[in-house]
Image (tube, rainbow, N blue to C red):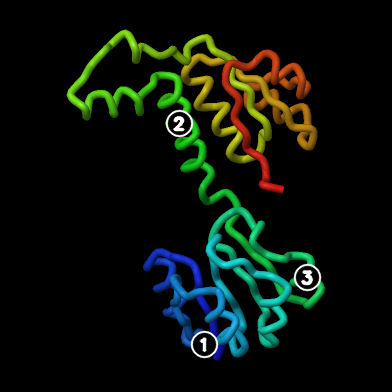
Amino acid sequence: MYKILVTGSIHQIGLEILRKEKDIEIQYAPDLPLAEIFKIIAPFHCILTRSETPISKELIDKAPKLKVIARAAVGIGNIDVKYATEKGILVINTPGKNTNSAAELTIGLLLSAMRKIIPAHIHMSELKWDRHSFTGTELLGKTIGIIGLGNVGHRVARYAKAFDMEVLAFDPYIAEEVFERHNAKKCSWNELLSSADVISLHVPKT
């Protein structure tokens, strides 16, 4: 029997998939304090988390049976991947699963900022309205500078094009054809900063 400790908030559908496996035992504890996780981690073969739990060297050392660290998200910044690898522990994540959501949120925030939606909402909730204060700016014809043209970055580029924005992008780690494929003009760091009306970052925290 393999024991999985779930310390992140996971949708019930995902949990049910795991529970159908006859050789898996799950302990679902999304709100468990880190100090308590240290106390109970020893017998578990896998820890499944999101961003709530820092999987440090110290925590790994408390889990002699640990074989898998699973992150139900894209980033793995809360996991000491180097140390886990040295200990022979597999670190896995779910790349690409939140790409569309992140890109849509980016465009939503961009619209909110450019069209002054939040200040207008606050003003209206106070039973006031000064339309000239909340005219905002159209996205049409504006230039967006995207730093990081990965999964989320190129999706933002596609959405920005739908608003007839010019798209500049800086990413020294991807091939020329990626810029062409997503109709983004490849430019230098300084050119992007000096030319863009809006800058959107889609890079790892590190």
Measured Cα–Cα span from mark 2 to mark 3: 37 Å
Give 187 or 33, whichever is nearer the viewer.
Answer: 33
> Does label 2 or label 3 sit earlier along the sequence?
3
Residue at far left of view: 127
Q: Residue 204 occupies which quadrant of the picture? A: top right
Q: Residue at the location (58% across, 75% down)?
A: 47
Amino acid at pointer 3: Tyr
Left or right: 27 as drawn, with respect to 38: left
Q: Position of residue 161 (x, y in %)?
A: 53, 20
In front: 31, or 67? 31
Residue drawn 77% across and 27% down? 176
Q: Nearer the viewer, mark 2 or mark 1?
A: 2
Q: Quadrant of the N terminus?
A: bottom right
In the rendered structure, are the residues bearing label 2 and label 3 in contact, judged by CB atoms less than 8 Å apart? no
Residue 126 screen position, x and y as percent: 21, 27
**Which amino acid type is marked by label 2?**
Leu
Question: Could you tell which of marks 3 and 1 lies nearer the N-terminus?
Answer: 1
Instruction: Kindly identify which residue carries mark 1.
Output: 23
Q: Identify residue for label 3.
A: 83
In this image, 131 relative to 58: left or right?
left
Where is residue 132 drawn, in percent x and y?
32, 8
Q: Is residue 141 above or below residue 40?
A: above
Disc 3 on helix, strand or loop? helix
| Disc 3 crowd, CA 10 A, few/some/many (<14, 14-19, 20+) | some
Residue holding disc 2: 109
- The Cα–Cα distance between marks 3 and 1, rounded to whole angstroms, is 28 Å
Viewer-nearest residue: 83 or 165: 83
| Residue plotted at (45% across, 31% down) | 109
